[in-house]
Image (spheres, rainbow, N blue to C red):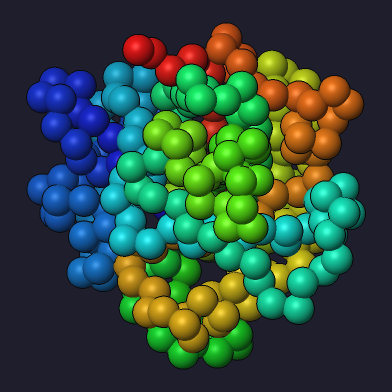
Amino acid sequence: MKFLSFVRPDSGQASWGIVDGDGVIDMGDIAPTLRAALAAQLTDKLPVSRAPDYRLDQIRFLPVIPEPQKIICVAGNYEAHLREAGFTTPPKPRLFTRFANSQLGHQQAMVRPSASVQLDYEGELAVVIGRNARHVSRQDALQYVAGYSCYNDGSIRDWQSHSTQYTAGKNFPMTGAFGPWMVTPDEMGDFDAATLTTRLNGVEVQRTTLGQMVLDVAALIAYCSTFTELLPGDVIITGTPAGVGLFHTPPLWMKAGDTVEVEIQGIGKLVNSVVDEAH
C-alpha cells in the first residue's frame, strides 16, 4: 500500500490517506495523522474498498510524516560518495539530525535561502519506523519498518562546513523534500536492486542501487535503536550516492527556476521546483 499526508482541497485541512490509482482515500476519520495511525498500529487494518475522495491532482502534498519526533540522517553511506568527498569508510554511522520544520512535500518549492547560493541536492531513501524500537537486533530490524519513501536532503554547503557538525547546513526552512508517499515494504520488490536516481532539470546527476549502501537499513535501525528509542513515524534518511553538486566542476548549485527529481524504483518520483527566499 501507499500512504501519504496531504491538505484537503475542499476544507484546507491536513489529513492522510491511501493512494488508490490516481486518487486518494481520505483516512482522516480513522486517525488524525499518519503518524498517529502508525502509533496505534492501524495501517494494516484499514478499509480500502471505498472509492477515492480526491484526485491526486486536487490535493496539496505534505511531507509523508509532517511532524516526526526524530529525523536521523546518515552521512557518507555510499562508497562512491565517500571517495568523491575524500573520506574513508567510517567504522560507525556518521549521523546528524534534521528538524521537522525544514521539510516540504512533493510538488512544493524548495527554497534557496538568502544567506547562500550553495543549495545542493541529495537524493536519498527514507525509512519510516512503524513501531517502538529499542535495542533491536539487526536480524529483527526490518520488522520495525512501516515503509519507504524518497527524500531530497537539500544542503546549504557553506553553512554545512562551518563546523564538523552538519546541523546548520541541513535545517534551513523548506530544504528537505519528503515524498510523494510511503510504500509498504511488501510493495518494494527487489530492494537491493532498486535504483535511486536524481535528476536536475531532466539531466541525471545521481544513480545507484540501494544495495550499494555501506550500512543497510537493518544495520542503521539496530544502531540507532541502541542510543535512542525509535518511535512510530520517526524517519531515518539513509545517505546520498555520488554525484552531488558540490563535487561538480564548477559546483552545480540549485537555483530559482530549477526542477529536481528523486526517483526510487518501487516507490515513485519526488518532484520539486526551486525558488529564492522571499523577503
Q: Quadrant of residue 129?
A: bottom left
**Residue found at x 57% / y 9%:** 257
Q: Judge left or right: residue 5 versus residue 198.
A: left
Q: Quadrant of residue 134?
A: bottom left
Q: How many marks?
A: 0
Q: Quadrant of residue 105?
A: top left
On screen, residue 238 above or below 112: below
Horizontal and vertical percent position of residue 31: 15, 55
- Foreground residue, 123 or 3? 123
| Residue 158 versus residue 142 in the image, above or below | above
Question: Going by the picture, which residue comes out furthest to the top?
Answer: 257
Q: Is residue 191 above or below residue 89?
A: above
Q: Relative to 275, is 166 on the left or the right?
A: right
Whether residue 246 is visible here, answered yes or no, is yes
From the viewer's side, name the closer residue of 155 and 214.
Answer: 155
Q: Position of residue 43 (x, y in %)?
A: 29, 61
Q: Residue at x 76, y 78 (%)?
A: 91
Decide which of 18, 273 is in the foreground and name it. Answer: 273
Q: Residue at x 59, y 73 (%)?
A: 220
Image side of residue 185 versus residue 81, left or right: left
Classify 184 as above or below 218: above
Compare residues 77 and 264 and report the one nearer the observer: 77
Inspect this view and state whether residue 260 appears: no
Drawn side of residue 257 relative to residue 100, left or right: right
Q: Residue furthest front?
A: 162
Residue 250: x and y in percent read 85, 23
Question: What residue do we see at 75% from left, 32% from top?
Answer: 245
- Quadrant of the image for the C terminus? top left
Q: Position of residue 128 (x, y in %)?
A: 44, 60
